Image: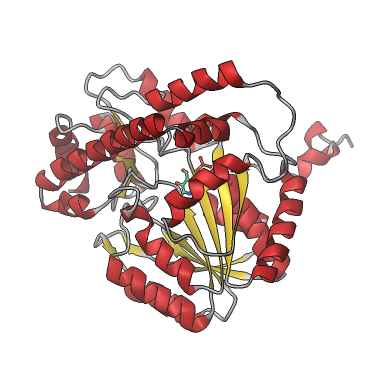
Amino acid sequence: MTTSPVAEGLFGALKPQAADSLLSITGQYRADPRAGKLDLGVGVYRDAEGATPVLQAVKAAEARLLDAQTTKTYLGAEGDVGFLERLTPILFGSNAPANVFGLQTPGGNGALRLAADLLAAARPGARIFLGGPTFPNHPLIFDASRLKTVSYRYFDVETQSVRFDELMDALVTAQPGEAVLLQAGCHNPTGADLTPDQWRAVADTVSARGLTPLIDQAYQGLGLGLEEDAAGMRLVVEAAPDALLAYSCDKNFGLYRERVGALFIVSANAERLDLAAANAKLLARGHWSMPPDHGAAVVRTILESDTLTLGWRMELDTMRRRLVEVRRALAAAGPALRSFGDRHGLFAQLPLSPAQVTKLRTEHAVYMASSGRINVAGLTPATVPAFAEAYAACRG
Ligand SMILES: Cc1ncc(COP(=O)(O)O)c(C=O)c1O
């Protein structure tokens, strides 16, 4: 009897995996000849022309770097320390906590992975409370780090409302020291954020129960503004004995492919912080050894210059205002889309079945993730009516 070549080799034992469906949707969109087609798939900012341009502040910083850089020797395990120092007040405000340690990571995803590994190292078999629906990389990363995920419903897609009661129920079930993932703002995939009162209630419970928040901050400045998008998260960090913050500069600086992020560790106790920092550095060495330089150097160069910082803030505000404008147009387009006006950032999660998503694509040339998540940056006020009509036709 002959064995098949697939069964013979080691890799034949691996489970088959589906291809990234968002990338294949983008391919289908490109091949679609229909005029007026809409790409609401991949989660990057787009301007009204559908482009994701390099920010002018980034271009200017890159020109300066090209001129001034004298070496390509490795950065240390912590990464670009100037980048971390300049980012700290943007994230924490003028009253940064006393004990903070930052470490540059490859994107927000790198920071999430490092945070998850640190939680698992601190408490083998640790649980993390995760509200759904959420960024699909969250469960992927937590599984890879061997954390046990406890899921609860954060958002009811059918009624388009945050289930704050279910979030609070989850928090009171968590044991002291256990971790809870919270998105700081511009929630992916729903766009539905906590109100200031809700953040205060979360902070009180985190404090009362001694929980460890893992804050995911990937869109600062794209919701209500740089300060506003950090206000709730700051309350929670302040209330917690220990906290972790996974930060991404990939969206708010438009640096996606440069993979710019940081993990910030905060502790009420300086010795605990030193322990956590030393362990995080070791874990980072096991993953990527040293982070890449370019993107973080660009952010540092911008933040070191008052002129470039001002330019970046203005460009960020332009992006934010465009998202608000599209959301307002959606909210005005009919009762089914009214809640879009109160939501923030790039995303919305529509109550659509996979068959309805397919119908929108085949019959109306509207492309989105198979989960029903849309990127509102794929729309303009001018294209909103066509989208609203197609959506209504498919919802029935
Ligand atoms: C909720 C959330 N967290 C973190 C990230 C991390 O992004 P990146 O690794 O590209 O910096 C993203 C990006 O899509 C996200 O949506």
Q: Is residue 62 left or right of residue 312?
A: right
Residue at the image point whose x is 26% and y is 25% from the top: 37
- 120, 248: nearer the viewer: 248
Q: Quadrant of the N terminus?
A: top right
Note whether residue 210 is visible.
Answer: yes
Q: Is residue 192 left or right of residue 327?
A: right
Residue at the image point whose x is 58% and y is 64% from the top: 99
Q: Which colour assignment does the render follow?
A: secondary structure
Looking at the image, is 65 positioned above or below residue 190? above
Residue 363 placed where, x, y %?
25, 31
Q: Is residue 5 left or right of residue 193?
A: right
Note whether residue 106 is visible.
Answer: no
Residue 123 placed where, x, y %?
70, 71
Residue at the image point whose x is 25% and y is 26% from the top: 48
Q: How many numbered circles are shown?
A: 0
Q: Is residue 331 left or right of residue 300?
A: left
Looking at the image, is 286 positioned above or below residue 159? above
Residue 125 placed where, x, y %?
69, 70
- 390, 260: nearer the viewer: 260
Residue 225 placed where, x, y %?
30, 48
Looking at the image, is 176 positioned above or below residue 301? below
